[in-house]
Image (tube, helix red, strand yellow):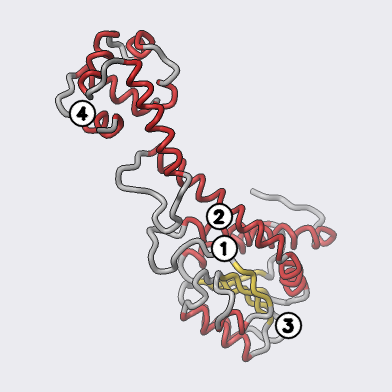
Amino acid sequence: MKIIPQLKDQTGFTHNEKVIAGYILKEKNNVLTKSAAVLAKETYTSPAAVIRLCKRIGLSGYQEFKIRLSAELEQEQQLISEIDANYPFHKEDGIREIAVRLEKLTAESLHEARSLITSSAQDFEKACSLMMRSGRIVIFGVGDAYLAGLAFQARMMRAGFNQFLSSPVYGEQRHLAQTLQSGDCGILLSFSGITGSTLECAEILSKNHVHTISLTSLRSGRLAELSDVTLVLPDKEKKFRRYANFSSHACMEYYLNVLYSFYFTRKTDDITRVRID
């Protein structure tokens, strides 16, 4: 049986063995560089207790323990390197494993997002151009997309760009869409590209000849057809089979941050003083 599950289970362990096991689980990588004497000192036990623990889990001694633990940790890292964006953590994971998995998932997602941004830089420039020559700019989205839009709006307003709006009452976006007209701009946020209320707003904006920018992972579909510019998000997640939208949310915020930053650099001449609280 593997070492780590036994250390977690602690079946038949004495008090000192439980103390040593708990320390090893918290300091897995660091333990590999320590002697039995050092491990005993740091757990306020004894070298004999460390050896007894090793034998309790079926090993000949501390040296075999370190060899086996090293192999398990290497295997663990290999498993972590193959992260499923839909199910990025497992029931048996501890805080360390979850932190490593989510860090890696975020890094991989943003790397893919950066590649897409680089290859579609002209679309980002076009989107920024639409925003710069528009009157009101309204952000539409549902759920986490709505929250990402609010953060984007707040960032713009703190920089002095007060023409950026979102519905102050959640669920009233359709009515806000109906107030826009030619010369305004709508930013439509939908990872799936098929969110009903967002599509409804897109239909209204198109009918009223309002400029539209969409952020979605759906390259083709009604939302893309209705948009003047479509900024395509990485599609690492299955839209209806996921624990949480870690990847898509990170990428959407990244895209909006790039849009904000590019817009800001093009409007700096209009800003005499910027204060961010």
Disc 4 element:
loop
* Element marked by disc 2: helix
Residue 16: percent from the left, percent from the top? 23, 16
Q: Is residue 149 above or below residue 204?
A: above
Image quadrant of residue 13? Answer: top left
The disc at residue 109 is 2
Q: Is residue 108 above or below residue 148?
A: above
Mark 1 or 3: the one toward you: 1
Q: Quadrant of residue 268?
A: bottom right
The kind of residue on which mark 2 rests is Ser
Between disc 4 and disc 3, the foreground one is: 4
The residue tagged 4 is 10
Image coordinates for residue 180, horizontal then vertical, percent: 64, 83
In the image shown, does 202 or 235 lie closer to the viewer? 235
Chain-order first, disc 4 or disc 3? 4
Q: Mark 1 sits on what residue? A: 234
Instruction: Give the mark nearer the N terminus: 2 vs 4.
Output: 4
Marks 3 and 2, the one that precedes in the sequence: 2
| Residues at marks 3 and 2, CA–CA distance in whole angstroms | 34 Å
Determine whether label 4 and label 3 are within 8 Å by CB.
Answer: no
Q: CA distance from mark 1 to mark 3?
A: 30 Å
Q: CA distance from mark 2 to mark 4?
A: 37 Å
Residue in the foreground of this view, choosing between 128 and 163 = 128
The answer to whether residue 205 is left or right of residue 169 is right
Amino acid on which disc 3 is placed: Gly
Mark 3 or mark 1, which is nearer the start of the sequence? 3
Left/right placement of residue 64 relative to residue 11 reads right
Q: Residue furthest right?
A: 269
Q: Which residue is mark 3?
A: 183
